[in-house]
Image: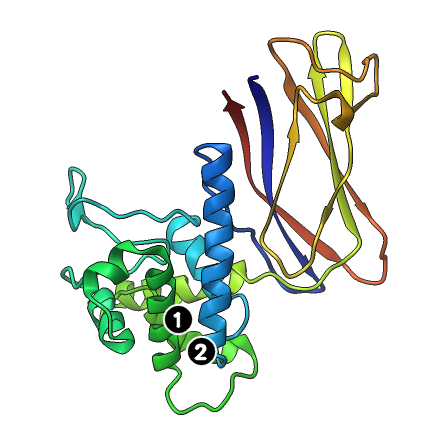
Amino acid sequence: MKSAVLLLAFGLASGVAWAAPASVPVAGPSETEETHAALKAAFAQAYLRYPRLPQGALEAQAFVASRWQHRVPEAPYAGRHGMPQSYGVMGLYRGQPGFADQVGVAAKLLGLSPERVARDLHSNVLGAAALLDSALGERSKVGRIEDISEALQNLSGILPAQASATAYARASHAFDLLLTLCTGATGVNLAMAVNDSDGTERSSARSLPANQWTYVEWKLDDSAQWSAWVGGNGVISSSQATLDAIWIYRAQSSYTVHLYIDDVQYRFEG
């Protein structure tokens, strides 16, 4: 049976902190779930191996570098302008001009081959973790995440230089990582409305957990996930439908919550 799925990616933060979510690649239902599960396992393994690393730093790097997609380019350069290509979900470079050989250095730190670090998802995550841990130097622990911005800059792969543009690019990468780190709010639920041929249908609510990269989805052809709203009948049966609204419900009111919607995707399952 074929079905259609509407998928949204979210990030959640509280107070004055910023957050943005990590996207999960959507190529098919099984591949999406397997990739997401493999990434969670790889991150967990990396934090166990390198306990000094602040929670969320690796997920942030994966989001900024690849939008959580494990990409292995066929060549180190691509496109009309010969842009240097990064490797793996963590976006590691291989020593192209202006970039560090992150793959090679990570391979030495891990005792693995460069090809394995470049191509294997778990090894790629461990490689980035090893690079960040090495950049922390003699620190026994990390206090505020902002205090290791120099180490986060190194994850960009851009070699330090006197040029202001280079310094800006490295600092921007660190800022993007800090922007992506997810913190704190609880008690948030999400629902959505979809317009089809006979009115507007309202979805069931989904909870948005704190401190976790999250994507939520609703099956458009599953009537159990929908109820009638304005002029609707609780069933999405039209061949064409549009997203009408996204509702955000929260149980807490003692602080400001920042919610970021990164992506909205339609996936057809056959």
Q: Nearer the viewer, residue 105 or 137?
A: 105
For this orientation, the residue located farthest to the front is 1
Density class for disc 1 (Cα within 10 Å; few <14, some 14-19, many ≥20) is many
Residue placed at 75% from the left, 35% from the top? 191
Where's residue 163, x and y in %?
A: 23, 68
Q: Residue at x 70, y 17 (%)?
A: 195
Measuring from the top left, give residue 176's x and y in whole percent: 46, 60
Tell me the residue that label 1 is attached to: 129
Callout 2: helix, strand or loop?
loop
Residue 130 quadrant:
bottom left
Residue contact between numbered discs 2 and 1, judged by CB atoms under 8 Å: yes
Within 10 Å of disc 2 (Cα), the crowding (few <14, some 14-19, many 20+) is some
Q: Residue 50 bears which disc, if any?
A: 2
Q: Position of residue 79 (x, y in %)?
A: 18, 39
- Tell me which residue sits at (14%, 61%) in the image: 97
**Left or right: where 265 falls relative to 50:** right
